[in-house]
Amino acid sequence: MLEVTTSHYVVLSTLLMLIGVIGILIRRNILVLLMSVELILNAVNINLVAFSAALQQVHGQVFSIFVITVAAAEAAVGLGILIALFRNKQTVHADEIDLLRW
Amino acid sequence: MSLDTVLFYVLAALVLGSAIMTITRRNVVHAAVWLISALVGVAGLFLSRGAEFLAGVQVIVYIGGIMVLFLFVIMLVPVHDESTQRRFSNQKWPATLAAVALFLWVAFIAVNGVGMLDHPGMAEPLGPGSLSENSEAVGLVLFSQYLLPFELASILLLVAIIGAIVMSKTRNRETES
């Protein structure tokens, strides 16, 4: 238990993913929703780096770089959508945006 | 208790505590600053697993790029009336239950499956000899084996830039041009 193993990192990343999922599901502010997505992507990165160290190969770290790239693209487009949404609906709350609800 | 173990638990507490603060703070700026703290913790975890290059990328891209973008957008949308608004949606308890159920499921699979990685010798962090070689190793693999995905990532970023500009462009400027 004293030695840090890959299992420790997997459990940590699962907990981080749990916090991110809860954040996405319970918060109303879209900005916090996007931040929760970043938390989940970081949980993925922790896993990839832990496995990369366990297997003594850098492929996991290369994948993490791609995950960070996709996270940057996701944040840029997501925040652009948020600005467009705020301009049209005057709200940043996810449960007040119900144009598609019947 | 070795230094590695102490470092892991300190960083894990920092990451998880900051993540919880991120999703519970009422003020969005506070949430963003707590998220920065969580990202620093994740960069520290990368360091403790011998991924120095990735730790640098994490700090530069995430904290220097993405979080500054977040703070800029927070500046553009008003958050001053946030203190009078409900923080959580109506579905918070069922949603939390569902998320915890998902966590238990994923943790069950992960803890069962990861046992095969935990025999001695495999879970050792990369030795000090590989410290200076990490960036080199990542670069070699990235620019040889993953060259096509790397180029595709640049196209993805270009698309994201154009998409962000199109999304946040005002209608006035559209009619002017």
Image: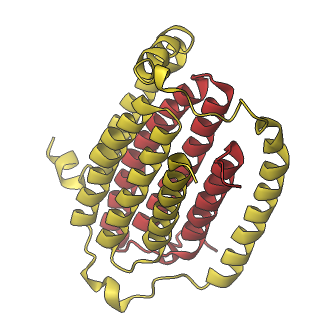
Chain colours: A red, B yellow
Res. B73 image quadrant: bottom left
In the rendered view, would you say B8 is above or below B61? Answer: below
Residue closest to the eye, A7 or B88: A7
Q: Write the residue at 38% across / 52% down.
A: B40
Residue toward you, A28 or A47: A47
Where is residue B93 shown, x and y percent of the image?
Answer: 67, 83
Is residue B83 in sight in this rendering?
yes
Give me the residue at 52% from left, 76% from top: A95
Percent coordinates x, y for residue B27 in the rendering: 33, 77
Whether residue A100 is visible = no
**Residue at the image point whose x is 14% and y is 46% from the top:** B176
Q: Note whether B38 is above or below A9 in the view shown.
A: below
Residue B65, position in %: x, y?
Answer: 29, 44
Q: Quadrant of the C terminus of chain B?
A: top left
Left or right of B2 on screen, residue B122: right
Q: Nearer the viewer, residue B3 or B152?
A: B3
Q: Is residue B6 left or right of residue B78?
A: right
State the residue in front, B176 or B64.
B64
